[in-house]
Amino acid sequence: MGVHAFITGLAGLELGADERAFVREAEPWGAILFARNVSTPDQVRALVGEFREAVGRANAPVLIDQEGGRVQRLRPPQWSEFPPGAAYGRLYDRDPQRGVAAAHLGARLIAADLDALGISVDCLPLADMPVPGADSIIGDRAYGGSVEKVAAIAAAIAQGLTEGGVLPVLKHMPGHGRAGVDSHLGLPVVAADRATLEATDFAAFRRLAALPLGMTAHVVFSDIDPVAPATISATMVREVIRGSIGFDGLLMTDDVSMEALSGTLAERAVAAIAAGCDIVLHCSGELDEMRAIAAAVPELKGDARRRAAAALASARPASPIDVAAARAEFSAMMAGAAVA
């Protein structure tokens, strides 16, 4: 058997015997951690090591959503609190150079936390641009509403993570900002015309297309594909994400257990791969669900395997950093970003 085209969730703070056997046999490309998997630094390091030992690859990716603000799996008192993305946007509005520098330093500090645990991938940055009336699921996670600002801040965050030894994931392609529904709960449909999308939502991602990893949005763009959300739409993946945006990195789905998608988990996984996604992300940590995903996805081959290898090859060792001094500098930079 070879490496299979999925990322698995894990159930708890350590691998159980059945879970360990599943990981060994199914050989997922990677694993993703959530708050349920986090207690202390030593425990997280041990869990990361257990997963890599079970899967048999010392460089198997371990992912986490560590954005700051509402989406932060590692929290005080064991880890530092980080601001939501909108805080960098507010600084940028006052001083673009300072906003970009703060975003870079914040990401470098997040990477220091993750690298110390063996976590090698952060599902960050976002290039989503909310519009008035959109659902709050993106909200203050976003950096702003202009292509220039979003692209500049997102690029700085990606660079900060990379310098800290952590791979970035560009999300949610080709844009979740206009969604009027939380895709965890239902299927968002965006009715904006393609010309508008190309000039705004897609344009922000286009400037970041060289990043090594990307994540899809479970969103229907009705002017392009009126039926299927981007994750399972060959038109959206091949014509927009790979074509118009120009992204050639490893493309993973957002969590296929979210309510925006329909059908069984296996059907969702098959549809995503058929549409052109390289990797299926499944987050629940429920063993029966994990087995269903594993049975539905192929081995990593062809372009997907090439992209996976290229993504891992783009990782670099963390550059030196004085964490205490950097945290003090970051706090001073963010002092002016409080909500008015």
Image: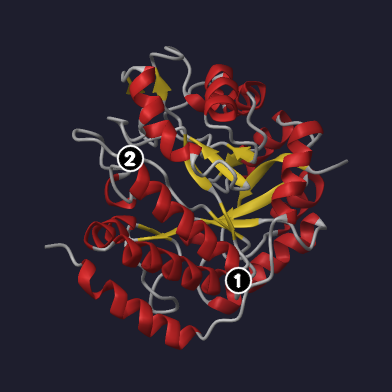
Q: Secondary structure at mark 2?
A: loop
Q: How many marks?
A: 2
Of all residues, the one furthest to the left in this rendering is: 340
Of all residues, the one furthest to the right in this rendering is: 1
Q: Quadrant of the N terminus?
A: top right
Q: For mark 2, what is the residue?
A: 129
Evaluate if marks 2 and 1 touch, with contact meaning CB atoms under 8 Å apart: no
Q: Residue drawn 34% across and 56% down?
A: 85
Q: Residue drawn 77% across and 47% down?
A: 309
- Residue 80: give x, y in percent of width and height: 40, 75
Asked if residue 43 can be seen in this view, the reply is: yes
Q: Secondary structure at mark 1?
A: helix
Q: Quadrant of residue 210?
A: top right
Asked if residue 28 can be seen in this view, the reply is: no
Q: Nearer the viewer, residue 138 or 210?
A: 210
Tell whether 3 sits left or right of 248.
right
Q: Amino acid at mark 1?
A: Asp
Q: Quadrant of residue 193?
A: top left
- Residue 59: give x, y in percent of width and height: 76, 60
Q: Quadrant of residue 234?
A: top right
- Residue 180: give x, y in percent of width and height: 27, 30
Q: For mark 1, what is the residue?
A: 115
Calculate the distance from the C-alpha at mark 2 to the C-alpha at mark 1. Answer: 29 Å
Q: Is residue 46 above or below residue 308?
A: below
Query: In front: mark 2 or mark 1?
Result: 2
Q: Is residue 293 above or below residue 334?
A: above
Q: Nearer the viewer, residue 228 or 161?
A: 161
Rate crowding at label 1 as few (under 14), some (14 to 19) or many (20 or more) other CA atoms within 10 Å. Answer: some
Q: Amino acid at mark 2?
A: Met
Q: Is residue 274 above or below residue 257?
A: above
Q: Residue drawn 44% across and 14% down?
A: 224
- Residue 140: give x, y in percent of width and height: 27, 51
